[in-house]
Amino acid sequence: MAWLWNNLDLVLGLTLDHIRLSAIPILLGFAASLPLGWAATRVRWLRGILLTVFNVVYTIPALALFVVLPGLLGTKVLDEINVLVAMTLYATAMMLRGTLDAFGSVSPDVLQSATAQGYSSTSRFWTVQLPLAGPVLLANLRVVSVSTVSLLSVAALVGSGGLGRLFTAGYARSFIDEIVVGIVFIMLLALAFDALLVLAGRVLLPWSARAKAPTRIPFMKGGAA
């Protein structure tokens, strides 16, 4: 505890870096998985291709990806953009299968009813399909967020990684207190991300806790084309 209090500014600064470097890939991965998942549910052959490609991406070791990306992006090895791109690819790969499951969980009868009521393909997605898939999407997003917060620490080996720098510095000096502080703060940060998503789910998806079947979710007004 003495080391933590003496270096509190350092730890808080690294924590803020960790939050930023985690939040951006999580949001981008979620945003990318939505159109990809939606397209894969409409074009069946695309599902297998997307899953194969992103499964391969996810099997690439993080450190190897950090080293390869500069050659592909034309950046320097220590540039932060390499970490953001790599973590976004991992987040998308983790989120994609969950997105497919989420959209697949929506009853076809509900979608047909929406179409019969005059909803266009776009309005049906935003006002019917996406809200009904929301609970499953949120559950997968929580897994992705915790995984991203944890995996980001590896980026410390290429000069980034937020709290992961406490691991490398502590290991270099054989100072266990610094490593323990890094572990504890990453765990607390992962729990904070998860709690924030749970709270967001209660606000944005109030029906998810009480709905027993998708058909009980009413269509939003004004969504018909």
Image: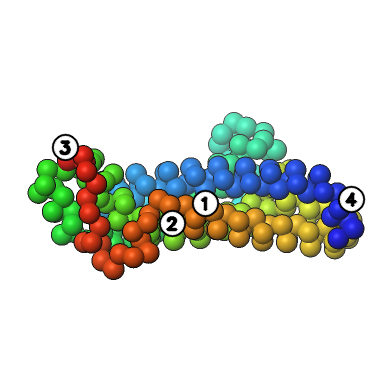
Q: Which residue is mark 1?
A: 90
Instruction: Compute the Cα span from label 1 to label 3.
Output: 36 Å
Instruction: Compute the Cα span from label 2 to label 3.
Output: 29 Å
User: Quick check: 111 left or right of 209?
Assistant: left
Residue closest to the far top: 74
Q: Nearer the viewer, mark 2 or mark 3?
A: 2
Q: Earlier in the sequence, mark 1 or mark 3?
A: 1
Indicate the secondary structure of the residue bearing disc 1: helix
In this rendering, does residue 22 appear at all? yes
Horizontal and vertical percent position of residue 138: 43, 57
> Which residue is at 22% across, 54% downward?
218
Instruction: Compute the Cα span from label 1 to label 4.
Output: 35 Å
Q: Which residue is mark 4?
A: 6
Q: Earlier in the sequence, mark 4 or mark 3?
A: 4
Q: Residues within 10 Å of mark 4 (few under 14, many from 20)?
A: few
Q: Earlier in the sequence, mark 4 or mark 2?
A: 4
Indicate the secondary structure of the residue bearing disc 2: helix
Which amino acid is tagged 4?
Asn
> Which residue is at 59% across, 47% downward?
22
Asked if the residues shown at circle 2 and circle 1 are in contact, with their CB atoms under 8 angstroms apart, the answer is no
Q: Which residue is mark 2?
A: 202
Indicate the secondary structure of the residue bearing disc 3: loop
Horizontal and vertical percent position of residue 217: 25, 57
Question: Is residue 87 shown above or below 72?
Answer: below
Q: Which residue is mark 3?
A: 225
